[in-house]
Amino acid sequence: MPGGDDKVKVLLVEDNQMNKILVREILTLNGYDIVEAGSGTEALKVLTTQKPDLILMDLHLPGMDGVTATRIIKADEANRNIPVLALTASAMKGEEDHILGKGFDGYVAKPIEVKKLLEAITTNLGKRA
């Protein structure tokens, strides 16, 4: 594992404090190591020094949105293999293909359901192995 630590590192990119706390709690309780960013720009800065195993990206962020940040991440050779899951409140029927078409590897609908969040993470980490 990266860094000699057996914990999976997840970069959580979320500007909503309540969502951030919720996701951090869920992931910490399930043994994940969390790195946080409050915007797309901040997420890109984090990636210059940290190598997460997976990124949870809110779509609606201040400044640079999650779609733009993901596009930049996926265009970078060093980060393109990191799975990026969209965190979105707009999980209407048909939205999934729209979101996946923007370069995301998967998505998790808000309000966040613990089981679905953990399944999405496990599935996408499995694809990497």
Image (cartoon, rainbow, N blue to C red):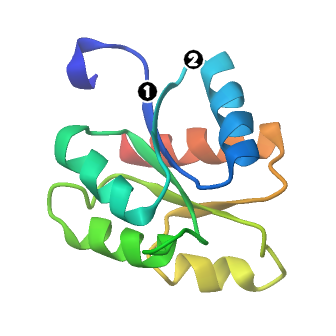
What residue do we see at 72% from left, 46% from top? 19
Reply above or below: 84 against 32: below
Give the number of callouts.
2
Badge 1 density bin: few <14, some 14–19, many ≥20, Cα 10 Å: some
Label 2 crowd (10 A; few <14 / some 14-19 / many >=20): few
Of the residues shown, which amino acid type is indicated by label 2?
A: Gly
Going by the picture, which residue comes out furthest to the left?
Answer: 77
Q: Is residue 32 left or right of residue 90?
A: left
Which residue is located at x 37 percent, y 39 percent? 53
Vertical position of residue 62 compared to residue 20: above or below: below
Asked if one can make out residue 118 in the rendered structure from this viewpoint, the answer is: no
Q: Is disc 1 in contact with disc 2, using a CB cutoff of under 8 Å?
A: yes
Camera sees residue 129: yes
Q: Residue furthest top?
A: 5
Q: Earlier in the sequence, mark 1 or mark 2?
A: 1
Disc 2 is placed on an element classified as loop
Res. 94 mark? none
Residue designated by label 1: 8
Task: Name the residue rendered at 36%, 55% in the picture.
Answer: 42
Q: Residue at x 62, y 86 (%)?
A: 98
| Image position, residue 128 (x, y; %) | 37, 46
17, 117: nearer the viewer: 17
Expressed as whole percent of the image width and height from the top left, the position of residue 44 reads: 29, 58
Q: Mark 2 = which residue?
A: 31
Seen from the viewer's position, the closer of residues 38 and 24 is 38
With respect to residue 98, does 122 lie above or below?
above
Q: Quadrant of residue 54?
A: top left
